[in-house]
Image (cartoon, rainbow, N blue to C red):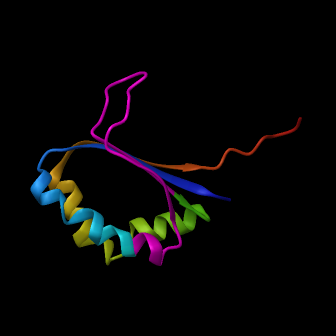
Amino acid sequence: MTAYIVAMYDIADAKAYEGYVPGVGPLIRKHGAEVLVADYGTQALEGKKRGACVVLKFESEAAALAWYNDPDYEPVKKVRVGSCANTSLVLAKEFVRRGT
């Protein structure tokens, strides 16, 4: 079943964050994920707007967790964590309609 990682965060240190996107790209590809959303100018309809919104699509929950827990992602993740604030990162499974 398809799974998604949804990340929303504020970039607190733009200079430090510069290394994140080039570092994470190859790891996203390594795990067969697709970037569905990468927006730095979202519009808040409810709640507080964050500076970045990213949605990654994985073939399964296991694939999403393999990406997140990949040891190669650890130093890249530190770049994001160290340069961002107000981070929310969630794993969500594909909606499957039950019945009719």
- How many numbered tags mark residues here? 0
Q: Is residue 35 magenta?
A: yes
Q: How far across and how far down the image is residue 97, in percent?
A: 78, 41
Q: Which residue sits furthest top?
A: 46
Quadrant in the picture for the N terminus: bottom right
Residue for point 53% across, 53% down: 4
Left or right: 24 as drawn, with respect to 58: left
Left or right: 40 as drawn, with respect to 96: left
Left or right: 91 as drawn, with respect to 82: right
Q: Is residue 74 above or below residue 37?
A: below
Q: Decide if residue 42 is in sight here.
A: yes
Residue for point 31% across, 43% down: 40
Q: How far across and how far down the image is residue 2, in percent?
A: 64, 58
Q: Is residue 78 magenta?
A: no
Q: Which residue sits furthest front?
A: 41
Q: How far across and how far down the image is residue 39, in percent?
A: 37, 45
Q: How far across and how far down the image is residue 37, in percent?
A: 46, 49
Q: Which segment is the magenta one? A: 27-56
Q: Is residue 79 above or below residue 45?
A: below
Q: Decide if residue 88 is in sight here.
A: no
Residue for point 24% across, 63% down: 20
Quadrant in the picture for the C terminus: top right
Q: Is residue 66 above or below residue 80?
A: below
Q: Nearer the viewer, residue 74 or 55?
A: 55
Residue 58 found in image quarter: bottom right
Q: Nearer the viewer, residue 80 or 93?
A: 80
Residue for point 33% across, 77% down: 71
Q: Is residue 43 above or below residue 78?
A: above
